[in-house]
Amino acid sequence: MFPEIVCTVLAVDRAGLLHPIAAPSLPEEFSASLEGVFIGPDVGSCGTAAYLGVPIAADDIEHDPRWSKYRGLVMSVGLRACWSSPVKDEDGATIGVVALYFREVRGPDDKERAVMSTSIELCEMALSRHARVVDRERRASVDALTSLPNRAAFNAAMARVPCEDVGSWALLVVDLDNLKVVNDTFGHQAGDALIRIAAQRISRAMVPDVTFRVGGDEFSVIVQAHASLADLDATAARIFDALETPADCDGHMVVPKATIGGAVLSPGDASAMAVSQNADFALYHAKETGRGGFVRYWPGIGTRITHRRDAIRDVTAALRDGRIEAYYQPIVRLDSREIIGVEALCRMISEAGEVVAAKNFQTATSDVHVATALTSRMLSIVADDVRRWLDEGLSFGHVSVNVSTADFYAGNLGSKLRESFVEAGVPLSHLILEVNEDVYVGQRDRVVAREIKTLRESGLLVALDDFGTGFASLTHLLTVPVDIIKIDQSFVARLWPDDASLVVVEGVIDIATKLGIRVVAEGIETEVQASQLWAMGCKLGQGFGFSRAVDRKAMTRLLQLHSQGAGAVPLYPHDARAEDRGADSRKRLTATG
């Protein structure tokens, strides 16, 4: 009917890839160049029509920005204009594209539009029939639970997405935060319902961009829409907004929660997989810094994640080789310098024999398995050391041991304490559990609060460590009481007459005392600080002014000297330190505190 017009028909798969079906008037290499092209807002007329789901008319290919990447291809065969229309199935999803190419600069006339309308109907019939025939094969790229493209489809799309134009696309990785809780609490049917609902909401919020389900509770979105790229934070907020409405999950009302990491195609990204890795780095960082938020990749974040992985590797090796040790720092009465307790601090001995403080491998404890293994190891060491001190008749009061969020969530902290101390023949009355302030109030659920309550009811003492550095306030003590508050050393270091810390510390001491909570000041380094704190009503303290953290052997000597009346400042004898240095010159204290 129109011998001067060239026609092409392309299929569009669920992953958003183009596949030429018919182009009898064009060279084979033309069709081959379109095979597997990822649709988008600037992918010629066909790729754009498929992406937006609307007809696209390019009356002048040479000057149309949507054809910037492909104009040389079509103009080399004498084509100057193109009109593309999407072919949609009965559900409204784009399954193909029909295109008319003109050899002169122009658009379609009414007669050509009418023929195109009929052609689209015929193509819809043919493509839908074909889709039914190959449905089994199609399922290989579609997630059965959510009907979203699956991991295989995502890999195929990422292999085809162009990486030439910096900033032309981005990747969002969405991780559901509460799937495990829903599965454990309400069952897997409720968990499956949560995944389906989250999938629907994310994919709708991100239209026209494609959403993939790439894991059990993880989704990925290849973002190409210009408005979404212009403000990636707002785009992530769209997903959060879509998820925040409570959902009926098998009869249980659940609010889907998610954490999102994102990365934009940047200079130096040689492949789409580099962008994917960057988005994963951002997601990991978002989880570490507080679930429920969005983090966009920046160059330094990869180094931080690498540091975390290295720390996990080093600590795991140290646990395996028995190179985790307990060092002890005494807690004293500020008036008499009597040792009323010791804090057990985790130390890792490097393969070179250096003593590494916990703050230098703190990131490793973000791994649940590492964190719980460290606690088990520390409890075992401390229980054995306390047993030796008891057998020698040494007075040491209580021993404080730090526990992590992972220990509370493991659900076996109480039994772990009993196994370590009871097996060593040590009463639990000698133990104080120290909980970091971020652990104390950093979780939005009640797991930690419930466990603290249970432990205190069983007779254990609980101390709130590093008070003043995180989110805790004295009002939290009304709902989650503790026995001891440890004022962070950053406040003690600023006890100057005109500094606000003086007022804050004095107020905390006064309120805690009236609530019946003991106060320990950390980081005391001078006699002036000790005297100031005593005058404010603080009775107990620890810090370098009394003793650094020392190993079991040195701590035992210190307890022996103290029992003989050698309670002077500093408590730790100078000759003992010199003796330690001579005993093993290979061991160097790289970080203390």
Image (spheres, rainbow, N blue to C red):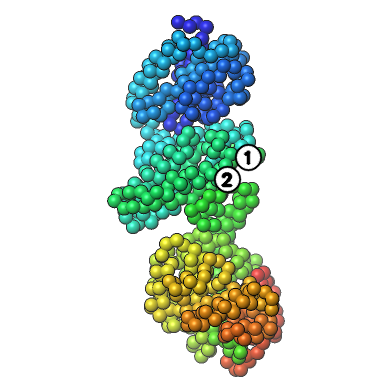
In the image: residue 125, left or right of residue 314: left
**How far across and down, in percent of the image, does residue 226 sit?**
56, 34
In the rendered structure, which amino acid carries the disc numbered 1? Ser
* Residue underneath mark 1: 266
Judge by depth and name the residue closer to the eye, 408 or 236: 236
In the rendered structure, which amino acid carries the disc numbered 2? Asn
Q: Residue at x 64, y 79 (%)?
A: 524
Task: Answer above or below: position of 41 versus 232.
Answer: above
**Label total for image:** 2
Mark 1 residue element: loop
Direction left: furthest residue: 251
Q: Residues within 10 Å of mark 1 (few under 14, many from 20)?
A: some
Judge by depth and name the residue closer to the eye, 545 or 441: 441
**How far across and down, in percent of the image, does residue 157 sit?**
50, 33
Identify the mark at residue 330; answer none if there is no mark.
none
Mark 2 residue element: helix
The quadrant in which the C terminus is found is bottom right
Judge by depth and name the residue closer to the eye, 280 or 462: 462
The quadrant in which residue 74 appears is top right
Direction bottom: furthest residue: 565
Q: Are marks 1 and 2 in contact (CB under 8 Å)?
A: yes
The quadrant in which the N terminus is found is top left
Q: Is residue 109 visible?
A: yes
Task: Answer above or below: position of 266 versus 328.
Answer: above
* Residue underneath mark 2: 278
